[in-house]
Image (spheres, grey):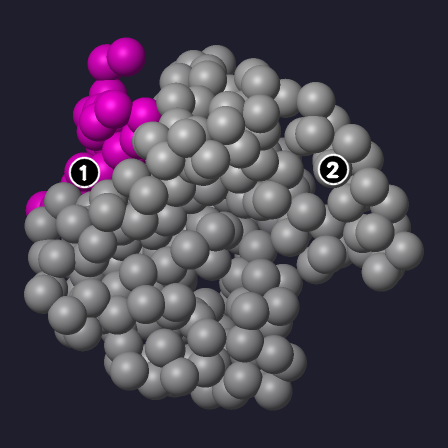
């Protein structure tokens, strides 16, 4: 892939996606969204990827949408393109490997919406989050209003969105917007460590586990329990499950194949 706004790398079983417009505060634009789709294609066709880390070049995660786009976006543009753009973020949420977001510095608007679409968020202590679309006469439209509400609850979401408040890392952790703060100012390193731990687990079990939690957020208890029954019946027939049990009793490190 010939990428200009993103960097795509692999470290073992971990795919690493880097927002790479540091000179433009890693603002998201049409080119970055187009390249993001290509990277997602690459990840989803690679059976060796067991976890994904999204991070940013430079000292800021993302200042949000490239403001220069606002001059060309109108209602017709939204009707034609917004669903496709929303689906880009949803794809991180629904793809099989868990996606960990490493946030450093400011993370505004579409950057916060991207972080919310990831499964786990790790932030540096200098991270600042905000959804400031209301300041521009808009409302978050890349899933921010929906995911933020599910993550922090409706009243916190209203405070953040309607008052356009900026949240420091400590408050973001307190309300659950962030899952873990990085003590050593290296959230990407922390994210890679966590991704490495996940990548060592049985891949089928990890993928079913991620889907089960997503199902829990979207459906009834009975539907979730039915999903658990189906995934459990499948997992008990896998080679990895048998390998996990054999390795445990043999007091050795298991070797999982994703089968």
Comparing 96 with 226, the one in front is 226
Residue 28 is situated, as x and y percent measured from the top left of the image, at 33, 45
Badge 2 vs badge 1, beta-carbon distance below 8 Å: no
Where is residue 98 shown, x and y percent of the image?
Answer: 46, 41
Residue 122, picture quadrant: bottom left
62 on left or right of 199: left
Viewer-proximal residue, 166 or 30? 166
Residue that appears at 39% across and 67% down:
179
Task: Work out whether 153 lies above or below 44.
Answer: below
Q: Which residue is tagged 2?
A: 232
Disc 2 or disc 1, which is closer to the eye? 2
The residue lying furthest to the right in this view is 222
Q: Earlier in the sequence, mark 2 or mark 1?
A: 1
Vertical relation: 143 (above or below) 95? below
> Which residue is found at the position 90% from the left and 56% from the top?
222
Where's residue 39, x and y in %? 37, 24
Instruction: Please state the total of marks drawn on the protein image.
Output: 2
- Residue that mark 1 sits on: 20
Residue 240, labelled with which disc? none
Q: Quadrant of the N terminus?
A: top left
- The secondary structure type at the circle numbered 2 is helix
Cα–Cα gap, marks 2 and 1: 40 Å
- Quarter that holds the C terminus: top right
Q: Which residues are magenta?
A: 1-24
């Amino acid at each position: 892939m010939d990428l200009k706004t993103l960097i795509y790398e692999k470290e073992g079983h971990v795919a690493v996606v880097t927002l790479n417009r540091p000179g433009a505060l890693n603002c998201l634009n049409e080119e970055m969204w187009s390249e993001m789709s290509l990277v997602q294609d690459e990840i989803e066709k690679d059976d060796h990827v067991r976890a994904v880390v999204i991070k940013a070049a430079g000292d800021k995660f993302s200042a949000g949408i490239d403001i220069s786009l606002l001059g060309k976006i109108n209602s017709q543009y939204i009707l034609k393109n917004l669903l496709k753009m929303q689906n880009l973020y949803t794809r991180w949420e629904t793809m099989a490997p868990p996606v960990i977001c490493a946030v450093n510095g400011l993370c505004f608007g579409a950057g916060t919406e991207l972080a919310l679409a990831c499964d786990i968020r790790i932030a540096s202590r200098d991270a600042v989050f905000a959804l400031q679309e209301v300041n521009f006469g808009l409302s978050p439209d890349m899933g921010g209003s929906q995911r933020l509400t599910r993550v922090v609850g409706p009243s916190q979401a209203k405070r953040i969105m309607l008052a356009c408040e900026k949240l420091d890392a400590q408050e973001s952790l307190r309300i659950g917007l962030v899952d873990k703060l990085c003590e050593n100012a290296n959230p990407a390193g922390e994210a890679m460590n966590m991704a490495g731990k996940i990548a060592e687990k049985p891949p089928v079990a990890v993928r079913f586990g991620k889907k089960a939690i997503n199902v829990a957020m979207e459906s009834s208890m009975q539907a979730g329990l039915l999903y658990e029954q189906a995934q459990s019946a499948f997992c008990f027939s896998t080679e990895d499950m048998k390998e996990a049990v054999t390795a445990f009793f043999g007091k050795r490190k298991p070797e999982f194949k994703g089968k």
